Amino acid sequence: MTSAADEAHFSVVLPLALNPLLRPPSTVDQCRTLLESDEGTPSSRIAAGAVFGLHGDTRAPRIPRFTRVPGGSLRMGTPDSKVDSVVDSWRHVGVERAWIAKEAPAHSADVATFWLGTYPVTNHQYACFLQESGQSGVRPSTWLLGAYPWDRSNHPVAGVGPRDAEAYCDWLTEQTDVAIRLPTEEEWEYAARGSDGREFPWGEQFRADAGNVREFGLTTTSPIGSFPAGRSWCGVWDLAGNVEEFTSTLYHAYDHGGWVADDLTELLGDYPVTRGGSFSRFGDLARCARRHGPHPGELYPCGFRVAADTDPCA
């Protein structure tokens, strides 16, 4: 029996001639049909995404797709009483108590209806911004020698900073005549876990095949929407794994909680909270409540998705 990591590896690495799914261009329509559905395994969707990206992935047009997230109440964070059990569950990957203590205490938050990017912003979408805004000299750090990664056009853009993300939002605001911004921390967590307080976007138990996290074994970004099991309750994809995502919220202690001076505060001082984990991080960062930040280093590139208070595509 092959593991999820083995399936992903062979589906992506085998020569095109040996993989029936990857015989372009006759299978482009098949790839589109598969990717526009919730069907298929992560490995088959990654392979289909590789082909579809070369032909222009319609899930990632110049103006991103948005999903309406109906407002509601959120039980945000983690109860003080559960911090130690969470740490114990993830101690095998080096999780420290201070990291989880930032999630406490659990508290209620009300979230108004908003619109959230159905997928993270892709390399293609970010390239459109750079070209049309005249900021083409500012390239993501993951673009080797600054070259646009044409073979990863439908992968999330990664290796940008919060100011880069905000500049993209300003440009998209001009294109849509709707105020585009980064989601708040509350909005992001609500879109991931909903009102039922689930631990992961898909439910209570960790699954290595529900998001592009380190346990899955791909060790690089994947085409958007490759993990159908990880699609959240409101229809948003990739809220767990692939790339960490900036929010607009600076790290602060929750009400009645304590300030946590961990390695991020020591390295960065004030920093925007990132959410969701990535291909290079273990599944603890895929938890809906997990608060992280833009840790410096080539192994931790961050991306983002966009949000709005009204429908940008109306």
Image: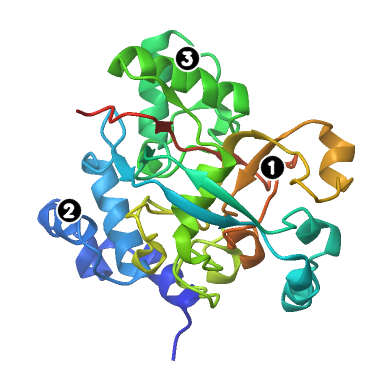
Element under disc 2: helix
Residue 14 or 290: which is nearer the viewer?
290
Q: Residues within 10 Å of mark 1 (few under 14, many from 20)?
A: few
Quarter of the image where one finds residue 122: top left
- Amino acid type of the residue tagged 2 in the rendering: Arg
Say which residue label 2 marks: 32
The residue that appears at 42% across and 36% down in the rendered structure is 121
**How much space separates mark 1 and mark 2, taking CA atoms?**
32 Å
Element under disc 3: loop
Q: Residues within 10 Å of mark 2 (few under 14, many from 20)?
A: some
Residue 243 appearing in the image: no
Check if mark 2's residue and mark 3's residue have beta carbons within 8 Å: no
Picture disc at residue 298 = 1
The residue that appears at 47% across and 72% down in the rendered structure is 203
**How much space separates mark 1 and mark 3, taking CA atoms?**
21 Å
Picture coordinates of residue 33 (x, y %)? 14, 58
In primary-sequence order, the first of circles 2 and 3 is 2
Q: Looking at the image, is 143 positioned above or below residue 44?
A: above
Say which residue label 3 marks: 136
